[in-house]
Amino acid sequence: MSGPIFRFSRTYSLLQDEGYLIYSSLTYGLTQIRNGVITDKGSIYAALFNTGIGIERLQKIVYIIDYMFENELRAPDEKQIRKFGHELDEDDLIVKIISFLSNFNNGTRYYNFNNLKLQKGSNPIREWCEILFYAGTKNISKKKMESIMKMSSELGLKLSEVAISVRRGSDEYTLSHEEMLSATQIQTEASKYVVKSILEFLSEYRSLLSRMCHKAYFLGVHEPVIPQMQEFLDWVAPEPEFCLRKKKWP
């Protein structure tokens, strides 16, 4: 004999499904950021699409829940959600990352199509590489950087004696063996700090959602309206010793 059927509200169900989308987008995106390098552009594009979508939708969820608490649990309409934006003005790594992902979501993801005839706009792969190198210069020690350059130079010279390089960088030109080796190693090291910065950012949103969704327990309504959305971010751990060595999320 089956038990009673419990019905969730439509709003609860839609927000919960959105949580699953955010969870999958962010975990997959961060994994690709951590492991993607210039020689694997497919992984970089996957990282940008998924992380950008995950963060954008997370910000919209915060806006929607806050709106519902302020408007007798009525959800905002589509126009109100689309108008919602997130602005940051400080000159910091996370600001560069969020600003870049916002621009990617809003247009630069079409760079390849838009530039088939006329060159216009910013190349997102080149911009992402610049962010990685910025993170590298801020966090990789001088000794480590010198070691990477020395090893890349020595190994690149040996490789050039037996093979040619056909790997492109962020434009139409091929990278030398030395450039390819140094870029790959620097980006691998720098990606740790990019992921750490994003995790710290997500941790703030998790705390905010936890405080907001906790109020849902005291609404006194017959059926649940707002899920505990912070649970979709329970894998977020910005502690340096943890996120600097982790390569896959969750």
Image (cartoon, grey):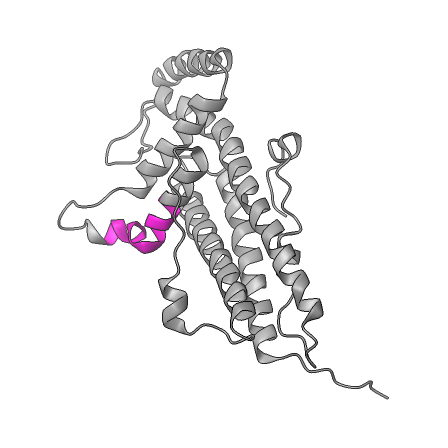
Q: Residue at x 53, y 38 (%)?
A: 195
Residue 215 or residue 142, whichever sits in front: 215
Residue 76 or residue 33, whichever sits in front: 76
Q: Is residue 164 visible?
A: yes
Q: Is residue 225 above or below residue 150?
A: below
- Dominant secondary structure, magenta: helix
- Range of magenta residues: 100-113
Q: Quadrant of residue 156?
A: top left
Q: Could you say where residue 117 lies in the image, as x and y percent from the top left? A: 13, 50
Instruction: Give the quadrant of the N terminus.
Output: bottom right
Q: Quadrant of residue 149?
A: top left
Q: Could you say where residue 148 lies in the image, as x and y percent from the top left? A: 46, 16
Q: Quadrant of residue 138?
A: top left
Looking at this view, name the residue that lies furthest to the left. 118
Q: Residue at x 39, y 42 (%)?
A: 41
Horizontal side of residue 162 vs 136, given as left or right: left
Q: Is residue 228 visible?
A: no
Report if residue 180 lies within the magenta region: no
Q: Residue at x 48, y 56 (%)?
A: 59
Residue 150 or residue 85, whichever sits in front: 85
Q: Could you say where residue 111 lies in the image, as x and y percent from the top left? A: 26, 49
Give the number of marks.
0
Residue 119 or residue 142, whichever sits in front: 142
